[in-house]
Image (cartoon, rainbow, N blue to C red):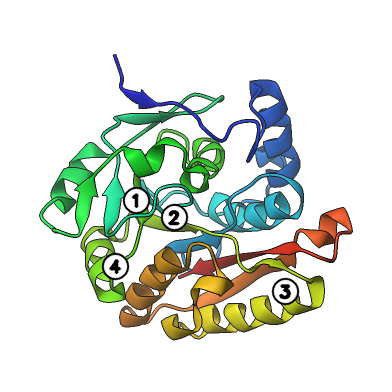
Amino acid sequence: MVDARKPAAAGVSYPAEREVLLERLHELLGDPSARDGHEPATPARGLVVPHAMTGASGTVAAAGWRRIAASPAHVKRVVLLGPAHHVPFGGIAAPFADAFATPLGIVPVDRLAIESLRRFPQLAVNDLPHEQEPSLEAQLPFVYTVLEGIAVVPLIVGELADDEAAEVLDAIWDDATLVVVSTDLSRYFDAPSARKLDEETARAIEKLEPAGIREERACGHAALRTLIVVARARKMHVTRLALAHSGDGSGESDEVVGYGAFVFA
């Protein structure tokens, strides 16, 4: 029997009912049979997307995942990086689970990859940060749909030095691995302030400048800086796919949450 981590964000970050979730994914990603089959010139190696399928967040996240759907063949494994919203800790946490359960089915966890990373003292196998964490879980319906059957390496990035986190990612990020950072951008600023902050953050991501990614700019700031540090060392380039905030869908302007989608190649 597979030891699968149970969903904690179903019904909040994405629909809990299978048929409703399938309908939402079809709405966001479109009909696979209708895609023109044109693949991008360079395969995607990394992705930054927000962590909910609702409203503007879902629209922005889908912009990223449609890019992966256009050229999925090279992806044999997905490393998911995200923040700890509920359990502050130091280091990086991987789960004990063999799989993550979703309303669509089971997403396997690459246990061999996790075991290979245990040589790094900054990484611990610890279920506690994963139990209620929505950020990684919210990407699983996209992984299941766009990259069916692909195993994931779920890593929650807590408090640690950027170079220590980058050391772990660099060890596992090969040409067959897609790295996905699940993060929102600015949170609870008024709409004009959010647009200004998120534009500045977007430019820092595009220029591969980790110093521009601070705590108030992204809830997954540590995970995002980790991706940027390694991508910069590998001389990757970044393309902005979408930038929006929650008020773009709701009409709210007093306290909004920023969302961005970026692809690394």
- Asked whether, in this view, residue 82 is left or right of residue 139, the answer is left
Q: What is the distance, in whole Å, between disc 3 and disc 1 at their CAs? A: 28 Å
Q: Which quadrant of the rendered structure holds the C terminus?
A: bottom left
- Can the viewer see residue 41 in this picture? no
Query: Residue at coordinates 34% horizontally, 39% vertically from top-left?
Result: 128
The percent position of residue 259, horizontal first and vertical second, equals 66, 63
Which residue type does callout 1 highlight? Leu
Label number found at residue 194: 3
Q: Residue 180 in the image: state x and y as whole percent.
A: 45, 56
The amino acid marked with disc number 3 is Ala
Q: Dot 2 lies on which element?
A: strand
Q: Nearer the viewer, mark 4 or mark 1?
A: 4
- Is 15 displayed left or right of 171 in the figure? right
Q: Residues within 10 Å of mark 2 (few under 14, many from 20)?
A: many
Query: How far separated are the C-alphas under marks 4 and 3?
Result: 27 Å
Q: Residues within 10 Å of mark 3 (few under 14, many from 20)?
A: many
Toward which corner of the image does residue 176 lie, by quadrant?
A: bottom left
Q: CA distance from mark 4 to mark 2?
A: 14 Å
Residue 242 appearing in the image: yes
Residue behind mark 4? 160
Look at mark 1 in the image and give the residue it sits on. 155
